[in-house]
């Protein structure tokens, strides 16, 4: 029995639960965020990126403005995403899934749930690094289109993607 076989069964049985996160989840979400963004830091050879340097207090402060979702498996947070709405645009940020649970649909489900949570938004917007091919591919499969690129520094270009809310 391979790990992929087990993970496929895990997804088919929906053995994970997605809930709105609470401020009490900050420590666990921050630890997961730092673990997940190590992959991004390695792509760009830059370990000073904001998701890795964000403090507990900074994350806690985000709970005032953002809605956080968490994905639980065996009472452990294995994924998260956050968003806020401004001027009928839902800004989605920091989609993270524990490396052991990637590529089995958890990121897709978190995105679906955050879009549902903000179903009155006219559009959804997010960004990722231009070299983050897996991220861009996932977002494009979910109906997002690149609408802007922004060079942050010589080693980092951000790609901005948007999706018009077809439910409205």
Image (cartoon, helix red, strand yellow):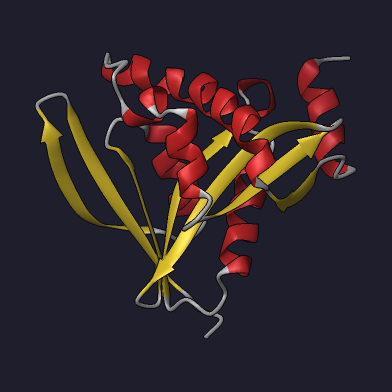
Give me the residue at 79% from left, 28% from top: 7
When asked about the image quadrant of residue 156, the answer is top left
Question: Picture quarter containing residue 155?
Answer: top left
Judged from this view, the residue extending furthest toward the left is 154
Q: Answer with left or right where residue 129 lies relative to residue 1.
A: left
Where residue 123 appears, x then y in whole percent?
A: 41, 72
Question: Horizontally, is 51 left or right of 26 in the view?
Answer: left
- Residue 63 position within the rendered picture, expressed as x and y whole percent measured from the top left: 53, 50
The residue sitting at 74% across, 52% down in the picture is 19
Q: Furthest-bottom residue in view?
A: 168
Residue 62 seen by the camera: yes
Quadrant of the rendered image containing residue 116: bottom right
Q: Is residue 106 in sight in this rendering? A: no
Image position of 94 with respect to 154: above or below: below
Horizontal arrangement in the rendering, residue 25 relative to residue 91 (left or right): right
Can you give x and y, in whole percent of width and height, for residue 110 in the image?
63, 50
**Seen in the image, is 57 located left or right of residue 97?**
left
Q: Residue at x 82, y 15 (%)?
A: 2
**How many numbered marks appear?**
0
The image shows residue 115 at horizontal and vertical percentages of 56, 64
Q: Who's the residue at 62% across and 67% down the image? A: 117
Q: Quadrant of the N terminus?
A: top right
């Amino acid at each position: 029995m391979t790990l992929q076989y087990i993970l496929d069964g895990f997804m088919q049985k929906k053995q994970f639960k997605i809930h709105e996160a609470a401020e009490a989840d900050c420590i666990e979400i921050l630890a997961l965020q730092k673990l997940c963004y190590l992959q991004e830091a390695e792509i760009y050879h830059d370990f000073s990126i904001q998701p890795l340097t964000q403090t507990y207090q900074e994350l806690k402060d985000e709970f005032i403005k953002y809605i956080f979702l968490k994905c639980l498996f065996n009472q452990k947070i294995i994924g998260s995403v956050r968003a806020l709405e401004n001027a009928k645009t839902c800004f989605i940020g920091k989609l993270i899934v524990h490396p052991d649970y990637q590529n089995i649909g958890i990121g897709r489900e978190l995105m679906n749930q955050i879009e549902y949570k903000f179903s009155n938004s006219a559009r959804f917007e997010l960004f990722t690094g231009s070299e983050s091919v897996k991220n861009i591919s996932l977002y494009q499969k979910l109906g997002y289109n690149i609408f802007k690129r922004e060079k942050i520094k010589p080693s980092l270009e951000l790609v901005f993607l948007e999706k018009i809310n077809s439910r409205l």
